[in-house]
Image (tube, helix red, strand yellow):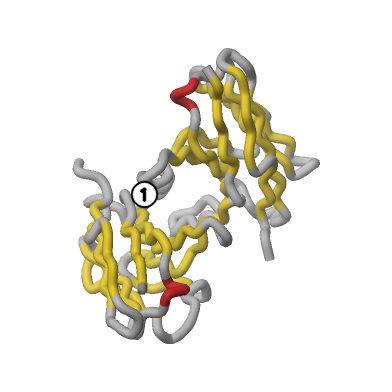
């Protein structure tokens, strides 16, 4: 298995632009999570899906952030418009009970 | 509200020494406690995990000790090696098939000196 696949690995964009991060979970996993990691705030859960349904999006910073999971093999996290304070590493992870999470390698986002 | 508190934030250990990282949780409903290891430029990777029905779990040089009454658990790395230098995260969650929403500690940056 190729693991959780995230794209792009790096993204540099200008403030105000739309950014879309992509994630392909491990086949058969039924839960998917989006995390943001910064030095100041550590790992923050943004949103998670169970069986493609959003369960908890209380961690989404504001309306500029949105996430979708149209099917079991694909999810997106969109930021529109992006701001410099959104600069972080964004991780996608998937899991299947009773096993733990598998994280992707992350997308390093820089908003200038 | 930070539900999982991790200490220390950073740790320096000599090669061959024992590294100890501690975590405390608040939610007594948590029943799954994993540790993750993260190398620079990589995502966190599951290292070892424990359920509260046991007080200790060992896998190679890595041991989790769990104290349910104190709501604390710790990671011990025996015979620490330079290759163990990484950031370690403890976490806690409910353990069910509705989606295990992990709450992570703040992380400990471990450096093992040769």
Nearest the eye: A66 or B67: A66
In the figure, A23 relative to B79: above or below?
Answer: below
Percent across and percent down for residue B2 are 67, 60
> Viewer-proximal residue, A70 or A111?
A111
Q: Which residue appears at 38% of the width and 47% of the height?
A: B43
Q: From what the image shows, is residue B49 above or below residue A98? A: above
**Residue A10 location (% of width, % of height):** 27, 59
Q: Residue at x 41, y 79 (%)?
A: A83
Side (left or right) of B12 relative to B69: left
The residue positioned 31% from the left and 69% from the top of the image is A52
- The residue located at (53%, 56%) in the rendering is A39
**Residue A42 visible somewhere in the drawing:** yes
Q: Secondary structure at mark 1?
A: strand
Q: Chain of mark 1?
A: A
Judge from the rendering whether residue B65 lies leftward or rightward of residue A62; answer left or right. right
x then y, percent, for residue A16: 33, 85
| Residue A91 shown left or right of residue B84 in the figure | left
Residue A31 in sight: no
Judge the density around disc 1: few (<14), some (14-19), many (≥20) Cα neighbours within 10 Å: many
Q: Which residue is mark 1?
A: A103
Q: How many marks?
A: 1
Give residue A63's quadrant in the image: bottom left
> Which quadrant, please, contains the C terminus of chain A?
bottom left
Left or right: residue B30 compared with residue B83: right
Q: Position of residue A97 (x, y in %)?
A: 41, 49
Between A72 and A103, which is closer to the camera in this rendering? A103
């Amino acid at each position: 298995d190729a693991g959780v696949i995230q794209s792009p690995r790096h993204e540099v964009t200008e403030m105000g632009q739309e950014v879309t991060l992509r994630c392909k979970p491990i086949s058969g996993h039924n839960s998917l999570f989006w995390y943001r990691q910064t030095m100041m705030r550590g790992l923050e859960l943004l949103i998670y899906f169970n069986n493609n349904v959003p369960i908890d999006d209380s961690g989404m910073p504001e309306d500029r952030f949105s996430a979708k999971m149209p099917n079991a093999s694909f999810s997106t996290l969109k930021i529109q418009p992006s701001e410099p304070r959104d600069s972080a590493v964004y991780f996608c992870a998937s899991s299947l009970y009773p096993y733990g999470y598998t994280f992707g390698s992350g997308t390093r986002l820089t908003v200038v | 509200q930070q539900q999982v508190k991790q200490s220390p934030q950073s740790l320096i250990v000599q090669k061959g020494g024992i590294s100890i990282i501690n975590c405390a949780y608040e939610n007594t409903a948590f029943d799954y406690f994993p540790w993750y290891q993260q190398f620079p430029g990589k995502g966190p990777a599951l290292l070892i995990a424990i359920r509260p029905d046991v007080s200790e779990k060992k896998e190679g040089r890595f041991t989790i000790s769990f104290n349910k009454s104190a709501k604390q658990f710790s990671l011990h790395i025996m015979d620490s090696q330079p290759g163990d230098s990484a950031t370690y995260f403890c976490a806690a969650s409910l353990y069910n098939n509705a989606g295990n929403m992990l709450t992570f500690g703040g992380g400990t940056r471990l450096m093992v000196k040769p």
